[in-house]
Image: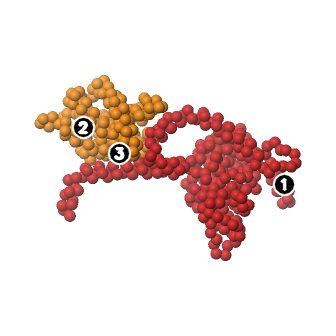
């Protein structure tokens, strides 16, 4: 197992535990405004190497989602959102592709592409992830307003959490 | 054929995505359905949001202490109720026949042929072998073993379990046993064929055994049939209690049990 793989595995383990044990319990909105959840784990899918095969991405997404679901006791909800995010990631990368394509040894990080690029990339990914997630969670478009409200509020805090992480640790991979 | 294979291969990722997404959504619906079945008739889980569940999980810890005090209060009210149901004695007034001890289920099974339940009340709370245990929705078992702080119950979903049950308002009584593997149905035996049964009849405890106070709702008649040449109906009873979700229970202590059993053994001798 290469050092890179083990690095990703450790990051998965740490972030999953962080999400499942700590972030899950934080209710920023309190009892009366239960619309804000911090979903930090999409960063795991975002930071996977650019050349990751698409099928592998989907399977990693499924595994990640199901693990998170175990903590949230909502089997399938996070998993479906993760699979969706893993599915659309290559397209987002394609849209944001720099002129001349991606160099061989770069990673989708602030270090390699700069803060502006990363914010576009992560922001799109996270917003779509949250939108899909809350759609499945609510499971009916009768409450479309609620879905959008949850997506927007959760996006703000989740995005901030992810950016803080990226600026603090500035990971190479 | 070759074209089809090429098409599938070229769009493999899309199909994998649709497959995995299908699995996920199936799981979502499936687990919701299961919870649906387990947690009573909250049939509108699709319209209520999962976030409400998350919320309820978060308030769960606060609920715990509230639950305990409510449980104690329930036990007290039940005790009063059971002692009142007894036919008003013209003779001297008795203080109490039944004492009710609240408890929580800490282990339960419904899957095997002979199921047992463990509760967190034992000898030190006054629980003894042979006492009946009920939940809010009806009888759930009989104490078969106790330690200082815990008791083991034979669930009503046990091949040896037998509850003396009666049809409310009609007076016929029989034994309720568990023949099927279905944890929501039991069979009522020994109802004579001339009994005027109807689907939907209410089944309650008869009070003839010393395990349970009389008139506790057990369930309703779902189906009854007479096998050829039989003198007794074969009655299927839909239980009111959901044995897979039993949580708060009450051990019923009958103070007259010694007197009643000694009478029975005296009579036999």
Q: Are marks 2 and 3 in contact (CB under 8 Å)?
A: no
Kindly identify which residue carries mark 2.
A49
Q: Which residue is mark 1?
A: B263
Say which element carries label 3.
helix
Which of the two marks, 1 or 3, is nearer to us in this view?
3
Chain in orange (letter): A
* Cβ atoms at labels 1 and 3 below 8 Å apart: no
Chain assignment, label 1: B
Q: Quadrant of the C terminus of chain A?
A: top left
Q: Label 3 belongs to which residue?
A: A80
Determine if residue A137 is in view. no
Residue B199 visible: yes
Supply the letter of whichever chain is red: B
Residue at 76%, 49% in the rendered image: B85
Residue at 69% x, 70% y is B193
* Placement of the N terminus of chain A among the 4 image quadrants: top left
**Residue A118 percent across, percent down from the top left:** 24, 31
Which one is earlier in the sequence, the residue at label 2 or at label 3? 2
Residue A31 at what x, y percent from top left? 48, 31
* Element class at badge 1: helix
Number of residues whose C-alpha sits closer than 10 Å to that of mark 2, classed few (under 14), some (14–19) or many (20 or more): some
């Amino acid at each position: 197992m290469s050092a890179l793989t083990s690095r990703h595995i450790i990051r998965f383990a740490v972030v999953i535990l962080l999400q499942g044990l700590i972030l899950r319990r934080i209710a920023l909105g309190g009892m009366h405004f239960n619309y804000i959840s911090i979903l930090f784990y999409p960063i795991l899918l975002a930071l996977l190497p650019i050349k990751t095969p698409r099928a592998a991405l989907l399977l990693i997404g499924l595994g990640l989602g199901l693990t998170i679901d175990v903590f949230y006791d909502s089997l399938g909800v996070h998993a479906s959102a993760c699979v969706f995010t893993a599915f659309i990631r290559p397209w987002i990368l394609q849209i944001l592709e720099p002129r001349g394509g991606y160099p061989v040894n770069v990673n989708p990080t602030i270090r390699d592409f700069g803060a502006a690029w990363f914010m576009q990339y992560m922001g799109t990914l996270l917003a779509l992830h949250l939108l899909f997630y809350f759609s499945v969670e609510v499971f009916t478009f009768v409450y479309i307003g609620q879905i959008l409200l949850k997506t927007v509020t959760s996006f703000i805090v989740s995005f901030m959490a992810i950016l803080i992480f990226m600026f603090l640790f500035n990971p190479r991979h | 054929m070759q074209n089809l294979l090429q098409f599938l291969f070229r769009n493999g990722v899309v199909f994998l995505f649709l497959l995995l997404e299908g699995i996920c959504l199936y799981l979502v619906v499936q687990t919701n359905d299961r919870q649906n079945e387990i947690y009573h008739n909250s049939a509108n889980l699709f319209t209520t949001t999962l976030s409400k569940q998350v919320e309820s999980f978060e308030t769960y810890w606060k609920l715990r202490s509230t639950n305990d005090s409510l449980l104690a209060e329930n036990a007290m009210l039940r005790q009063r109720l059971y002692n009142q149901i007894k036919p008003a004695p013209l003779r001297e007034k008795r203080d109490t026949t039944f004492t009710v001890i609240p408890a929580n289920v800490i282990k339960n099974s419904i899957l095997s042929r002979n199921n047992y339940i463990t509760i967190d009340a034992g000898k030190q709370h006054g629980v003894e072998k042979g006492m009946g245990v009920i939940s809010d929705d009806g009888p759930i078992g009989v104490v078969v073993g106790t330690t200082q702080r815990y008791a083991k119950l034979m669930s009503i979903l046990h091949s040896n379990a037998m509850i003396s049950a009666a049809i409310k308002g009609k007076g016929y009584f029989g034994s309720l046993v568990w023949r099927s593997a279905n944890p929501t149905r039991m069979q009522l035996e020994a109802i004579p064929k001339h009994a005027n049964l109807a689907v939907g009849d209410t089944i309650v405890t008869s009070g003839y055994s010393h395990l349970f106070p009389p008139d506790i709702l057990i369930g309703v008649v779902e189906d009854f049939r007479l096998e050829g040449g039989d003198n007794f109906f074969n009655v299927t009873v839909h239980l009111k209690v959901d044995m897979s979700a039993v949580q708060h229970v009450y051990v019923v202590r009958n103070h007259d049990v010694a007197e009643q059993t000694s009478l029975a053994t005296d009579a036999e001798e």
